[in-house]
Amino acid sequence: MLSISGLYKSYGGARPRELLHDISLEIRRGEYVAIVGESGIGKSTLLNLVAGLDLPDRGAINLDGTELTSLDDERRTLLRRGRIGFVFQAFHLLPHLTVAQNVALPLSLNGIEGATAQNRIAEMLAATGLAAAAAAYPRELSGGELQRVAIARALAHRPLLLLADEPTGNLDAESATQVLHLLREQVKRESGAGILVTHSVAAAATADRVLTLTADGLRPR
């Protein structure tokens, strides 16, 4: 489903810092993988590369037969819009849209409208405990609620690849358990693939495999 091969990424000007070094990873259809590691080691950078938000210096990223690094910006955007769900650590909700409208956004971008869209929105809001907040705006929500909106939005269009960057960082224990179950269920139900980046041992334990990202690459935990 997802194949990452020989990935390198550096940042900086005259003296660039290598953040990712020779990263390779294979994820099978229906597999949910957790990646852990020290802060600043490059976990979020790796997710951004897999999502096509950034390009590696070297290496290949193949999603279900499509090589992301060979696509131009527009085609990467279209692929990401249709096939990838990304739970951002910083939420990235649109402040002028309600909770329901934020969740509806990926559906609208993919041409999913009418009763199908409304059913998906209702399903996601109920699954994340946000049904009562459907008409609220992001500024009216707590950090934990914002996190759950971001998760509902990422899952609404039933993506092939789910990427989650610290999805339980702002949640209480009960909400975190609910969300982790929902993320895993999405990957299994859609026979897609998922990558969870987390510092939480409990969160990582919900994955099929746990990998540690170090300065030298990925290794089994």
Image: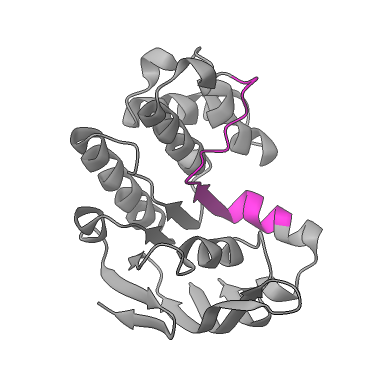
> Looking at the image, is 143 positioned above or below residue 11?
above
- The range drawn in magenta is 77-97
> Looking at the image, is 17 positioned above or below residue 166?
below
Query: Which one is in front, 142 or 184?
Result: 142
Q: Please say whether residue 19 is one of the residues in the magenta stretch.
A: no
The percent coordinates of residue 211 (x first, y second) are 32, 74
Q: Please say whether residue 90 is one of the residues in the magenta stretch.
A: yes
- 221 on left or right of 190: left
Query: Residue 195: which quarter of the image?
Result: bottom left
> Looking at the image, is 189 positioned above or below residue 157?
below
Q: Looking at the image, which residue is at 44% across and 53% down? A: 165
Q: Looking at the image, which residue is at 27% across and 62% down? A: 207
The figure's colour scheme reads one colour
The percent coordinates of residue 64 (x first, y second) are 55, 71
- Which residue ends up furthest to the front in the rendered image? 15
Query: Residue 202: which quarter of the image?
Result: bottom left
Q: Looking at the image, which residue is at 24% across and 38% down? A: 178
Task: Count all numbered tags in the image, as a single digit.
Answer: 0
- 101 on left or right of 27: right
Quadrant of the image containing the C terminus: bottom left
Query: Which one is in front, 101 or 198?
Result: 198
Query: Residue 95: which quarter of the image?
Result: top right
> Looking at the image, is 125 positioned above or below residue 30?
above
Q: Looking at the image, which residue is at 40% across and 62% down? A: 39
The percent coordinates of residue 159 (x first, y second) are 51, 51
Query: Which one is in front, 207 or 56?
Result: 56
The percent coordinates of residue 177 (x first, y second) are 21, 42
